[in-house]
């Protein structure tokens, strides 16, 4: 006796043959209905009665009805391999879907089965609930049905007509064109498909069909290439608003739509409410079941948007529940109070060779309050390149040290750590603070001695890299951990530094400007201080120059170099072509030395150099032994040369907008007049927008806002690294900023009140976000 899997495979081949032979019911001896009747008793799948019902009287159906039946049978095929669960009594009726039906693996969904389940898992669909929550990225309005004569070139529309002719053309090897003439009472339209040979058996002359696609006028004829089509009376993919789902190979958007529709009919009664009624009422949100129905099967675009708003709010609300819990946990944890007098803090300010800006003063007051609160500080200090974050960090370290604890500053690279060390020493050592450097490239003896001094409490502030979290590093009494460029450290590394002390206060710094509301989501457990004021207002003029004017730029830069200034020339570094890029940068250095800059000293810096080699080059730049630095890694090493005032960015179209702004921040750091040239050819509309924004905008937060508009949040915020690119399936971090704030306020209020209704919310938060929250929140 053949197995259910073997029967399923045989039926699949029969259905395929039935389509290829034009639905003539000749694919199997005795007809399709007879075949299924013969094998039905060999199957235990619960879908067998439905299968037999669908195929009943198949031989008497017309062509359109047969096509629909075959499609439905193909959808049911995967279920034939499922065994029906045993029943207590043979006579008892089939049980209705239970409350936990939505949690069942996706292979048990109607129309799925083992093979299709594997494909759906690629889309993150692992349960029946995941399928119902797999939301369309947009809807397409196919509701307006136009006459063929009304179509205009380039217009997308739905048309209906009768099949008048079908032709198959083979203009060359590996290319087969199926061409169908469709006629209504106003004209003829040609539908064309490429390399889809099975389509030639799908149409019958005189049959009414519905098409949706983009009309083109070619050689005097109207044509649609690869249009969506179906029988005119189907009303499934045309003649209405149709949701468009992200798909994968083997699962088309149309198949997803059909699966969702059929399973929604079965399981909609099990969709439970998540949001409290009073919150839904306050924000005019739909009930959850209604929202899911409306987003998959909207009657109007307004209904679709209201459903999307409801589900986006729900998603953001649940995420902020997790954020609120993290914040609450921090608030209730004890920490040492780090308090100093006004007089001691004034000593720090008086020792500075400059006055703090209003923004720096405000940030310092916030940090001082946190350190004295008796709970662990968790504060994000955010500011543009050159906004003075290091000085604020120095003041925070000074408070911790005067309060009889140690401080540590962890930077992502050795160059950046050395730079911080060199800048902090003159600020703090005159005040009696002992500052040490701890990085991997130190001689073993120096490293060991420094570790001993840190453990003995003989060092007040230690600056370093990942070396700070190694097992060999022990602190006498770590009170404050400062982490620079937060996004470059994972949650584990940050936790390892915090664990070097007892409930350590944490200050993280970021030079990536991010709109405040989005920051609240990304860094929700942090309080936020923003340095939106520059100690030295920058005077940088930015020009976008086409590649054919490159020589003019280099002649101008040579003229400026003669005045004693320094210049950077930056090359992008793309991993796939790293060797090519390095070769191009090295070749550029040699050419410049022999041509435009033959009177000047030119250096080279790239990522394949050792740390010692990088350090030597940077020392040469700082001592002005180099006039020009050709570099591929300027952002990575965090160059800080106050006198640099010229920059040329080659192939600027290969950089992101925020990267370009970070690069530009390396010149004009003392407020001197500076010039930045972006040499690029914009090959795409996005590249043009990016380069125009770079040329026209100088404020980091304005740059960040524009970057969000152009590219969305993914690249700007590094969301793939955070896990947020897949965490938010409905919410859009750009268009839903106001919604995000409202969801945050509601979530924080609910957790603060410790309402009983929050218990199921917490369960849903853990189910939906799980481990990804740990990644997303840092």
Image (cartoon, helix red, strand yellow):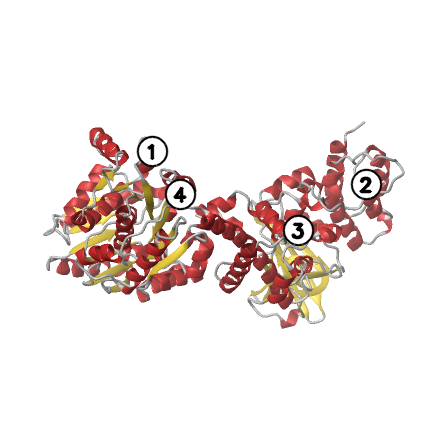
Residue under pointer 2: 48
Residue under pointer 3: 132
* CA separation in Å, label 1 and label 3: 47 Å
Secondary structure under the numbered disc 1 in the rendered image: loop
Query: Pointer 1 and pointer 4: residues touching (CB < 8 Å)?
Result: no
Neighbour tally class for label 1: few under 14, some 14-19, many 20 plus, Cα within 10 Å: few
Q: Earlier in the sequence, mark 4 or mark 2?
A: 2
Neighbour tally class for label 2: few under 14, some 14-19, many 20 plus, Cα within 10 Å: many
Quarter of the picture holding the N terminus: top right
Using the image, determine if residue 59 lies above or below residue 471: below
Q: Nearer the viewer, mark 1 or mark 2?
A: 1
Q: Nearer the viewer, mark 1 or mark 4?
A: 4
* CA separation in Å, label 1 and label 2: 63 Å
* CA separation in Å, label 1 and label 4: 19 Å
Residue under pointer 4: 503
Q: Position of residue 92 (x, y in %)?
A: 87, 40
- On residue 542, which mark appears? none
Say whether residue 683 is left or right of residue 454.
right
* CA separation in Å, label 3 and label 4: 43 Å
Q: Nearer the viewer, mark 4 or mark 2?
A: 4
């Amino acid at each position: 006796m053949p197995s259910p899997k073997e029967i399923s495979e045989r039926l699949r081949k029969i259905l395929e043959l039935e389509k290829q032979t034009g639905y003539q019911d000749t694919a199997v001896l005795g007809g399709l209905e007879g075949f299924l009747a013969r094998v039905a008793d060999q199957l235990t799948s619960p879908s067998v009665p439905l299968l037999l019902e669908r195929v009943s009287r198949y031989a008497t159906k017309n062509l359109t009805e047969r096509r629909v039946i075959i499609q439905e049978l193909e959808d049911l095929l995967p279920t034939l391999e499922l065994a029906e669960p045993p029943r207590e009594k043979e006579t008892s009726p089939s049980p209705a879907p239970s409350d936990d039906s939505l949690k069942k693996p996706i292979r048990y969904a109607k129309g799925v089965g083992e093979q299709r389940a594997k494909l759906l898992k690629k889309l993150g669909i692992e349960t029946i609930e995941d399928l119902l929550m797999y939301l369309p990225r947009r809807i397409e309005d196919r509701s307006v049905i136009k006459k063929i004569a009304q179509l205009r070139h380039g217009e997308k529309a739905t048309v209906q007509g009768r099949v008048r002719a079908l032709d198959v053309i083979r203009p060359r090897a590996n290319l087969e064109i199926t061409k169908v003439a469709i006629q209504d009472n106003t004209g003829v339209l040609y539908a064309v498909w490429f390399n889809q040979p099975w389509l030639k058996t799908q149409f019958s002359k005189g049959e009414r069909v519905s098409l949706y696609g983009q009309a083109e006028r070619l050689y005097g004829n109207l044509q649609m290439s690869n249009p969506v089509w179906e029988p005119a009376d189907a009303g499934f993919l045309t003649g209405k608003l149709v949701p468009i789902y992200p798909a994968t190979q083997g699962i088309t958007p149309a198949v997803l739509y059909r699966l969702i529709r059929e399973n929604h009919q079965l399981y909609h009664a099990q969709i439970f409410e998540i949001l409290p009624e009073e919150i839904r009422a306050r924000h005019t949100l739909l009930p959850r079941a209604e929202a899911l129905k409306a987003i998959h099967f909207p009657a109007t675009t307004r209904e679709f948007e209201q459903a999307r708003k409801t589900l986006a709010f729900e998603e953001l609300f649940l995420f902020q529940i997790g954020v609120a819990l993290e914040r609450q946990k921090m608030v209730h944890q004890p920490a040492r109070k780090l308090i100093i007098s006004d007089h001691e803090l004034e000593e720090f300010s008086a020792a500075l060779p400059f006055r703090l800006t209003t923004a720096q003063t405000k940030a310092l007051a916030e940090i001082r309050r946190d350190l004295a609160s008796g709970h662990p500080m968790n504060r994000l200090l955010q500011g543009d390149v050159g906004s003075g974050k290091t000085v604020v960090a120095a003041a925070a370290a000074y408070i911790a040290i005067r309060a009889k604890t140690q401080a540590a500053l962890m930077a992502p690279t050795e160059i950046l750590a050395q730079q911080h060390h060199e800048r902090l020493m003159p600020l703090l050592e005159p005040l009696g603070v002992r500052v040490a450097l701890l990085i991997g490239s130190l001689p073993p003896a120096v490293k060991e001695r420094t570790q001993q001094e840190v453990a003995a409490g003989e060092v007040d502030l230690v600056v370093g890299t990942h070396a700070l979290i190694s097992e060999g590093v022990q602190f006498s009494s770590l009170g404050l951990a400062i982490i620079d460029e937060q996004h470059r450290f994972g949650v584990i590394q940050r936790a390892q530094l915090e664990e070097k002390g007892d409930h350590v206060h944490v200050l993280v710094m970021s030079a990536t400007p991010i709109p405040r509301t989005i920051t609240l989501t990304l860094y929700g457990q942090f309080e936020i201080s923003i340095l939106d004021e520059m100690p030295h207002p920058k005077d940088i003029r930015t020009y976008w120059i086409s590649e054919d004017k490159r020589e003019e730029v280099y002649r101008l830069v040579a003229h400026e170099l003669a005045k004693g200034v320094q210049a950077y020339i930056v090359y992008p570094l793309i991993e796939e072509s790293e060797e090519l890029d390095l070769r191009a940068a090295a070749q550029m250095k040699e050419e410049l030395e022999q041509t435009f800059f033959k009177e000047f000293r030119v250096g080279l810096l790239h990522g394949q150099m050792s740390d010692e080699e990088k350090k030597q080059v940077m020392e040469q730049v700082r001592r002005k032994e180099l006039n020009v630095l050709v570099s591929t890694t300027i952002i990575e090493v965090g160059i800080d040369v106050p006198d640099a005032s010229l920059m040329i960015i080659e192939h600027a179209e290969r950089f992101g907008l925020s990267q370009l702004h970070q690069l530009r921040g390396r010149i004009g750091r003392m407020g001197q007049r500076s010039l930045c040239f972006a040499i690029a050819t914009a090959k795409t509309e996005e590249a043009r927008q990016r380069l125009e924004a770079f040329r026209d905008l100088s404020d980091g937060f304005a740059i960040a806002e524009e970057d969000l508009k152009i590219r969305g949040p993914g690249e700007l915020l590094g969301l793939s690294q955070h896990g947020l690119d897949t965490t938010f399936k409905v919410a859009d971090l750009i268009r839903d900023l106001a919604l995000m704030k409202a969801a945050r306020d509601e979530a924080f209020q609910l957790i603060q009140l410790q309402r009983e209704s929050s218990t199921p919310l917490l369960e849903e938060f853990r189910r939906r976000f799980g481990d990804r929250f740990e990644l997303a929140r840092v």
